[in-house]
Amino acid sequence: MITTSDGDLRATTRAVYLAFIFLGVAMASFAARIPQIRDSLGLSPSRLGLVLLATAVGSITSLPLAGHIVGRFGSRRTVTVMALVLGVAMSAVGVGYQFGVLPVVIGLYVYGFATGAWDVAMNVQGAVVEQRLGRAIMPRFHAGYSVGTVAGALIGAGAVAVGISVTVHMVIMIAASAVIVAVAVQRFGPDSTAEAPVEDKSGFMRFWREPRTLLIGVFVLAFAFTEGAGIDWISIALIDDYGTSASLGTLAFAVFLAAMTIGRWYGPGLLDRHGRVPVVRVLAVIGLGGLLLFAFGSHPVAAFAGALLWGVGASLGFPVGVSAAADDPAKAAPRVSVVASIGYIAFLGGPPLIGFLGDHVTVSRGLLAVGVLLILSILLSPALAPMRAAAAAPAGSPPPPVASS
């Protein structure tokens, strides 16, 4: 029999899944229409890159503030407001691109800002669900995001195929996603498993001086770079360095995404059975092996196999890092904000670095920079060990069940 508490937790879990899924849907709905927006504005590749950089700048602006925002207003209100802001911003992009570059840049900046705060808030709520369940589930939430990106991309491809305009497609899809999420997250629970207030009154900036939090942040950066490099460059490397068709390059990218999604879906069982540190070390080694196979393979089959292993290896680093940052529920928001802020630097600086290396040693060889960070992640993995219950729990509250994850 399901108790009221069990029913509430299941409803909260579904709401967190929807928050992750529809953030992915919104992102992919825009990404699917980038070629049409680019053509309408007449942008060169370099100018398009600068326009798209507005999203990363918005996220980097938002993330350092997100911990305070979530601590002050709670994850429920933060995601509700940011979902609606994101819907307005991206609808403005869908309309504004017809009038020039400036509306697109402004809309993408606001979209990036909303995404950053939304991301931290839903991860904080996901960490609370994980702690209440007493087992790992964060990677499955992140798998939900991956599923959302695939769904959004497929819908976008269908919209292009049947001739639906960019404006109609983006306004309907992104506005609908925003409204669905705003309604769903009303089932979010409190942001702490304890009765103590979540917001830390002693000053947010002190969390930027915590050695464990900073080490987890660098660990997450390494895996974010590993993930981002695969997303940005696998298809290009197949086409340019292996001489395949564009369709095969896109297929290799899809294999990478599918492997990462599967790793995130089945990863919680491994985390519960073996613990965070051994699992992420093994995955880093698998990812490194896939990367070497991809970079030095002599046939596209080797590249596909490398992309598969690379995707599995990259799958759990980001969500496990978020779980580790949120071990203490009362301080989850600021610590997740710090970790996400550091991790997102990879998405800002990674593409230019691989592009620079690709100009000199080919993209495939340039991707070996990812291997250096994977080795670094192995060295940093002890920081992910669960905090001791006495240190993590606020005074007077029962300790969260972190030992199994």
Image (cartoon, grey):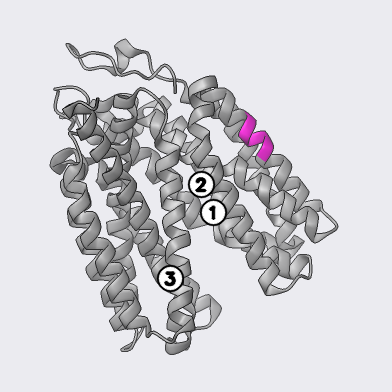
Residue 273 or residue 93, whichever sits in front:
273
Can you say whether 96 is above or below 279 in the image?
below
Q: Secondary structure at mark 3?
A: helix
Q: How many marks?
A: 3
Q: Position of residue 316 (x, y in %)?
A: 52, 38
- Residue 16 drawn at (x, y percent): 30, 44
Return the disc, 3 or 2, that comes first in the chain's sequence: 3
- Is tag 3's residue or tag 1's residue first in the polypeptide sequence? 3
Give the camera-side residue of 238 and 176. 176
Tell me the residue that label 3 is attached to: 155
| Residue at image mark 1 | 228
* Depth order, front residue of 365/237: 237
- Name the image quarter holding residue 386: top left
The magenta stretch is: 282-286
In the image, what residue type sits under mark 2? Ala
- Image x and y of residue 323, in percent: 39, 32
What residue do we see at 50% from left, 50% from top? 346
Secondary structure under tag 1 reads helix
User: Which residue is situated farthest in the front direction here?
Assistant: 1
Q: Give the CA separation, mark 3 to mark 2.
A: 26 Å
Secondary structure mostly taken by the magenta-highlighted segment of the chain: helix
Q: Say left or right for 196 vs 248.
A: left
Q: Amino acid at mark 1?
A: Gly
Q: Which residue is mark 2?
A: 224
Q: Is the C-beta separation of discs 1 and 2 under 8 Å?
A: yes
User: What's under tag 3, amino acid-wise?
Assistant: Ile
